[in-house]
């Protein structure tokens, strides 16, 4: 049963390439993009991004395991007889995903270099390198993660209020539009 869980998780996922190979892009631009990416410390950005996504990934995998008759028994065995239950399984899946994705950071950085080289001219890349090498640019890189965290928290708070308001109004409107026979008769 556990073997079938591993087989499911090991299934290859077909991903269509979305960027031109590096050899099709001006190599001087790719080199400048690699320098910029070094300044941007993409590994730190990836760590923050994937740390937020891995629990979601873990839950998604669990959903797949529960829904697939071939893996449900193995899942049930882990949850019912294993130590820590579903929370521990999510943590293990998340941890293994982080290990696997971190091993691929060089690929991500290579792809980023190609994408930056395609999106920006050599002069623009050099301008960005100059900026992020300056005091202001270095400060921006240092404080940007915390600033983004605060803005994300503010976005959640504002989004929650908007969602509550929209939900309330949507149900009021839906009742009027979808159940017109339940509305009081007008005289």
Image (cartoon, rainbow, N blue to C red):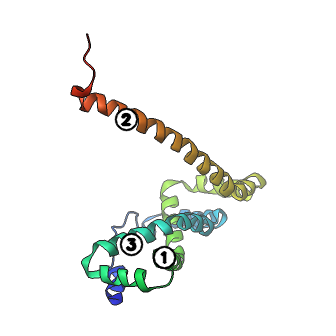
Task: Classify 10 Å Cα crowding around label 2: few (below 14), some (14-19), many (20 and above).
Answer: few
Q: Which sits earlier in the primary sequence, circle 3 or circle 2?
A: 3
Name the residue located 54 percent from the left edge and 76 percent from the top edge: 102
Q: Secondary structure at mark 3?
A: helix
Q: Horizontally, is 1 left or right of 99 in the view? A: left
| Front residue (pair 155, 129) | 155
What percent of the width, then of the height, locates residue 179? 24, 31
Q: Secondary structure at mark 2?
A: helix
Name the residue located 50 percent from the left edge and 38 percent from the top edge: 162
Q: Which residue is mark 3?
A: 61
Which quadrant would residue 180 be assigned to in this image? top left
Q: In 3D space, how far apart are the residues under numbered discs 3 and 2 (Cα atoms)?
A: 32 Å
What percent of the width, then of the height, locates residue 185? 24, 17
Q: Horizontally, is 114 left or right of 68 in the view? A: right
Q: Quadrant of the N terminus?
A: bottom left
Q: Which residue is mark 2?
A: 170
Q: In 3D space, how far apart are the residues under numbered discs 2 and 1 (Cα atoms)?
A: 38 Å
Name the residue located 39 percent from the left edge and 73 percent from the top edge: 62
| Front residue (pair 34, 150) | 150
Q: Horizontally, is 128 left or right of 77 in the view? A: right
What percent of the width, then of the height, locates residue 87? 49, 74
């Amino acid at each position: 049963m556990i073997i079938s869980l591993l087989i499911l998780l090991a299934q290859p996922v077909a991903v269509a390439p979305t960027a031109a190979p590096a050899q099709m892009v001006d190599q001087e631009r790719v080199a400048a993009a690699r320098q910029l990416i070094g300044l941007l410390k993409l590994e730190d950005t990836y760590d923050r991004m994937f740390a937020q996504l891995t629990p979601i990934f873990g839950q998604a995998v669990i959903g797949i395991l529960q829904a697939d008759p071939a893996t449900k028994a193995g899942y049930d065995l882990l949850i019912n007889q294993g130590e820590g239950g579903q929370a521990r399984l999510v943590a293990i899946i998340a941890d293994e995903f982080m290990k696997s994705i971190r091993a691929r950071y060089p690929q991500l950085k290579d792809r980023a270099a190609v994408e930056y080289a395609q999106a920006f001219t050599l002069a623009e890349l050099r301008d960005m390198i100059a900026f992020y090498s300056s005091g202001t640019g270095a400060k921006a890189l240092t404080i940007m993660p915390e600033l983004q965290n605060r803005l994300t928290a503010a976005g959640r708070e504002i989004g929650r209020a908007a969602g509550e308001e929209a939900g309330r109004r949507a149900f009021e409107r839906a009742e009027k539009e979808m159940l017109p026979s339940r509305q009081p008769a007008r005289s």
